[in-house]
Image (cartoon, rainbow, N blue to C red):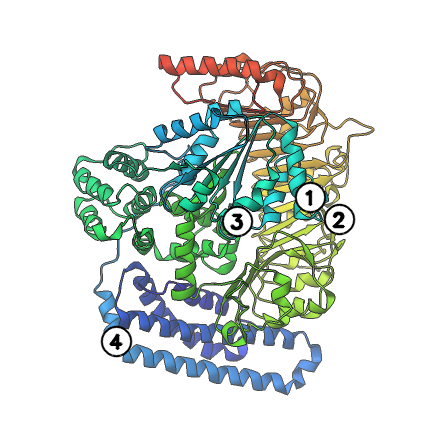
């Protein structure tokens, strides 16, 4: 198999040379010649990545190319920084003899690299030709993911057995372990049970906790507490025993509870966790999944042993995963059923093979090739690790540009729910999205993620209100494959963990690494004063925020001068050193800080694409001139950010416009001026937080009229700080809103319900979230003919008591969420006539529960009669006992 990481090294190096042409003017000729040489290699590498080759000579050749390309990239990257520092010296630069010597040295180094490239091409002509003779695998056109729930096959009887055990038995706390080998579907079964209507009805509280082999009890306990309260800050300094007592208090207050502990590896883990679960004679239950029979029997003498799928169930699952709602063509049935049988009833093997088949054409010959590849020896129930060979098969059939994206998911901790937006932006910053078309890179990256989901290599954990992937993760076995492939074969990243038999890498090891994923204490790692001269990415996954000691602040820029991605939200930067502002290659920054100002010098980091700053401050003054950052795509803060006023253009010059900027969230109302938005004409997502009276009242400096000119805006979030005092807030007329607006979220705006008639006129509005106290008043009667495109509606914490609605007001509604609507007497029965309505969720809206069940009865009747056969799901919490 070819080393796919090299493809991106070559692509990124070519981009680096193009982007920094002015700074590299002194080595322009040598750089252009190198670019020509590498272009020839790039064509070879793309072909290599398409082919599944075990040719050792070829693999060795690819490793040699990687070494050469790394050397070229390192030389150019260092020269860019050197040239920028030289440029900033003013008149002194003309007598900076040392600089010109370093430039000559780099030119000599590049010539040496070119000679190595020529020698490799000359000495390996046979290997290059051999590659041309291999046939690449055909790749099917990508499709967006199916938004509905994944099909679960063969688990109905299994689920019924476990549900019966959960609902029966004594009043004591009972643990029901589900045990089975990796990939057998323990988590899938537990999830099916967790979401079952009988379980939702029977248990007042349901909590899902992912444990894993490397669990941390403190973080696990804090995660459980977060299910009961949004404000967990007060618990962060508690000892673990006090956290357990707090959980006992929460669980003991209500009715009976169900806790799902997914993926428990040891009896010691269960013994340490169980102290948080009260045994109060309320028929409480714990559902536990484990691959270890000893753990299962320690918790219960009679665990539930998960069975393998039958041959028939295996074929049904394979067919659903490959063709979704369609049927398998007749000519593919024989090889397809043979493939399913060879998977020996192991669901993970089936879905992984399905991913490989999705990447194939739909011909008998190609399916027979897969059938022959899936030899009986690959699936051995006594040796589940052989599944890695099946993962390898599916991986080998990925397009070359998807391989690095897939492996990169392994840099996140096992079991970690990865926010899709974060993953996509990191892929872009790493240079994995090599796309030259007209669409934004984010669209292409989202397409890649959808492709990985469709191929069953990435699991969707949560979806957004419009059905897209919100969070995702890897199955443990796929995670292990990614980690091994990325670290041992591709040198894509290295995981840094300290333990009994592990220590932090030394200087020699760090000199060979390109990306570091820190799974231990980041401060402990930095205290060793690490030096990774060629490290491009530094990722930290500690959940606890730690203030960086002043003496350690220079460690990152001095130790890792060529960083492109710095994802260290667990570290609080309360000051910056001058070396930090010389990290000129940074594209992605995610940090925490208690500063009230973002330093002006951040504006010197001209390559920044994504800037994320989390703070405990109520406001954040961004002094950096973000308008001079030509590549800035996304600016995120969790507070009210005040943007700098764009500088007026000099005489006879046009004001600079950032065509790349897509996200500003969240900014102050005072920053919403025509000057600001004129600099960001392609803005797609905007969050505004503060005293919204400044924004919504006409003729103000930051009036809503300025937002009107954002013709590309699709997502708008308005958060009003504090309860409305003085003049009542009201919305501007519908024509003032951006014409392409698809999503709108309102919080603490205290609008009258009549204002919703304005929103009902927005032609493309699909998602409306009326969050805490967005509206006030006891009665809402939407106008007929409004909300023509609305698909998702949520209403949270309001005094609404009477609501009139039907298909005439919400003709395309699919999903309704009601949270803490304590006064709402009933949900309009007319909503049952909306053919598209599929999901209704009630949380702490007890009075409306009865009417919700009436709607469910009516929808079920429509389904049975076949008049309107779209499925309907009702969720009520806490259950209306």
* Residue at mark 2 to residue at mark 4: CA–CA distance: 61 Å
State the residue at coordinates (43%, 37%): 301
Q: Earlier in the sequence, mark 1 or mark 2?
A: 1
Q: Which residue is mark 2?
A: 617
Relative image position of residue 585 (x, y in whole percent): 57, 66
* Contact, mark 1 vs mark 2 (Cβ under 8 Å): no
Q: Earlier in the sequence, mark 2 or mark 4?
A: 4
Q: Secondary structure at mark 4?
A: helix
Relative image position of residue 336 (x, y in whole percent): 21, 41
Camera-side mark, 1 or 2: 1
* Contact, mark 3 vs mark 4 (Cβ under 8 Å): no
Q: Quadrant of residue 846?
A: top right
Classify 435 as above or below 552: above
Tell which residue pokes out farthest to the front in this image: 301
Q: Secondary structure at mark 3?
A: helix
Relative image position of residue 402 (x, y in whole percent): 39, 54
Q: Which residue is mark 4?
A: 125
Q: Which mark is residue 110?
A: none
Number of residue marks: 4
State the residue at coordinates (25%, 72%): 127
Left or right for 55, reference 439: left
* Residue at mark 2 to residue at mark 3: CA–CA distance: 41 Å
- Say which quadrant the C terminus sits in: top right
Classify 189 as above or below 381: above
Relative image position of residue 457 (x, y in whole percent): 38, 48
* Contact, mark 1 vs mark 4 (Cβ under 8 Å): no
Q: Earlier in the sequence, mark 3 or mark 1?
A: 1
Of residue 39 and residue 130, the one placed in the foreground of this image is 130
Q: Which residue is mark 3?
A: 268
Q: Secondary structure at mark 2?
A: loop
Left or right for 322, reference 753: left
Q: Which residue is mark 1?
A: 242
């Amino acid at each position: 198999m070819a080393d796919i990481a090299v493809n991106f090294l070559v692509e990124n190096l070519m981009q680096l040379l193009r982007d920094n042409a002015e700074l590299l003017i002194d080595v322009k000729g040598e750089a252009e010649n190198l670019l020509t040489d590498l272009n020839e290699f790039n064509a070879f590498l793309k072909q290599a990545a398409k082919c599944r080759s075990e040719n050792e000579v070829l693999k060795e050749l690819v490793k040699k190319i990687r070494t050469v390309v790394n050397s070229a990239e390192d030389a150019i990257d260092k020269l860019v920084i050197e040239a920028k520092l030289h440029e900033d010296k003013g008149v002194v630069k003309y007598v900076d003899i040392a600089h010109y010597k370093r430039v000559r040295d780099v030119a000599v180094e590049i010539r040496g690299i070119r000679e190595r490239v020529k020698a490799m091409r000359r000495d390996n002509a046979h290997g290059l030709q051999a590659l041309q003779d291999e046939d690449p695998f055909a790749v099917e056109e990508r499709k967006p993911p199916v938004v509905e729930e994944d099909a679960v096959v063969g688990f109905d009887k299994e689920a019924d057995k476990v549900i019966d055990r959960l609902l029966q038995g004594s009043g004591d706390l009972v643990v029901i372990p589900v045990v089975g080998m990796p990939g057998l579907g323990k988590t899938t079964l537990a999830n099916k049970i967790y979401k079952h209507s009988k379980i939702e009805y029977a248990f007042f509280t349901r909590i899902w906790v992912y444990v894993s082999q490397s669990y941390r009890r403190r973080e696990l306990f804090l995660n459980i507490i977060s299910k009961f309260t949004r404000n967990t800050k007060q618990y962060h300094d508690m000892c673990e025993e006090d956290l357990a007592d707090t959980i006992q208090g929460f669980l003991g207050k209500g009715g009976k509870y169900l806790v799902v502990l997914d993926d428990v590896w040891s009896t010691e883990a269960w013994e340490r966790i169980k102290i948080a679960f009260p045994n109060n004679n309320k028929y409480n239950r714990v559902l536990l999944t484990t691959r270890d029979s000893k753990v299962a029997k320690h918790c219960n003498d009679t665990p539930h042993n998960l069975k393998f799928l039958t041959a028939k169930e295996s074929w049904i699952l394979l067919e659903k995963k490959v063709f979704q709602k369609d049927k398998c063509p007749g000519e593919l049935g024989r090889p397809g059923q043979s493939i399913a049988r060879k998977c020996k009833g192991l669901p993970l093997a089936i879905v992984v093979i399905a991913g490989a088949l999705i990447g194939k054409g739909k011909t008998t010959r190609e399916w027979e090739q897969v059938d022959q590849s899936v030899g009986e020896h690959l699936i051995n129930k006594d040796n589940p690790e052989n599944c890695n060979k099946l993962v390898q098969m599916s991986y080998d059939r990925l397009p070359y540009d998807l391989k690095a994206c897939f492996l990169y998911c392994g840099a996140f901790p096992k079991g970690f729910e990865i926010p899709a937006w974060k993953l996509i932006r990191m892929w872009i910053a790493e240079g994995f999205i090599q796309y030259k078309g007209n669409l934004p890179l984010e669209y292409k990256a989202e397409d890649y993620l959808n492709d990985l989901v469709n191929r069953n290599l990435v699991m969707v954990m949560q979806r957004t209100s419009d059905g897209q992937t919100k969070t995702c993760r890897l199955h443990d076995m796929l995670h292990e494959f990614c980690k091994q492939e990325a670290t041992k074969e591709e040198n894509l990243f290295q995981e840094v963990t300290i333990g009994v038999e592990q220590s932090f890498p030394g200087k020699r090891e760090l000199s060979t690494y390109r990306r570091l994923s820190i799974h231990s204490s980041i401060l402990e790692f930095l205290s060793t004063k690490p030096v990774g001269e060629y490290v491009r990415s530094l990722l930290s996954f500690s959940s606890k925020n730690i203030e960086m000691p002043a003496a350690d602040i220079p460690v990152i820029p001095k130790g890792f001068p060529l960083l492109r991605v710095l994802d260290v939200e667990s570290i609080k930067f309360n000051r910056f050193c001058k070396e930090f502002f010389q990290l000129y290659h940074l594209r992605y920054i995610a940090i925490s800080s208690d500063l009230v100002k973002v330093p002006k010098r951040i504006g010197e980091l001209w390559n920044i694409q994504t800037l994320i700053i989390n703070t405990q401050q109520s406001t954040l003054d961004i002094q950096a001139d973000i308008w001079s950052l030509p590549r800035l795509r996304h600016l995120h803060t969790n507070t009210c950010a005040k943007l700098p006023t764009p500088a007026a253009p000099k005489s006879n010059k046009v004001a600079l416009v950032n065509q790349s900027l897509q996200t500003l969230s969240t900014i102050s109302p005072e920053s919403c001026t025509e000057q600001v938005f004129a600099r960001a004409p392609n803005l797609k997502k905007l969050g505004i937080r503060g005293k919204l009276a400044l924004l919504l009242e006409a003729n103000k400096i930051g009036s809503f009229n300025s937002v009107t000119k954002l013709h590309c805006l699709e997502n708008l979030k308005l958060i009003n700080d504090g309860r409305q005092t003085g003049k009542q807030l009201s919305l501007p007329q519908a024509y003032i809103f951006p014409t392409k607006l698809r999503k709108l979220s309102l919080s603490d705006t205290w609008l009258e319900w009549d204002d919703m008639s304005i929103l009902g006129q927005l032609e493309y509005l699909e998602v409306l979230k009326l969050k805490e106290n967005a509206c006030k008043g006891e009665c809402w009667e939407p106008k007929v003919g409004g909300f023509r495109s609305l698909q998702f509606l949520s209403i949270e914490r309001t005094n609404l008591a009477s609501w009139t609605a039907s298909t005439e007001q919400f003709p395309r509604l699919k999903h309704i969420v009601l949270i803490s609507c304590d006064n709402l007497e009933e949900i309009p029965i007319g909503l049952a006539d909306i053919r598209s309505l599929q999901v209704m969720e009630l949380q702490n809206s007890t009075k409306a529960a009865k009417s919700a069940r009436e709607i469910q009865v009516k929808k079920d009747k429509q389904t049975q009669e076949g008049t309107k056969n779209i499925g309907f799901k009702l969720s009520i919490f806490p259950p209306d006992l």
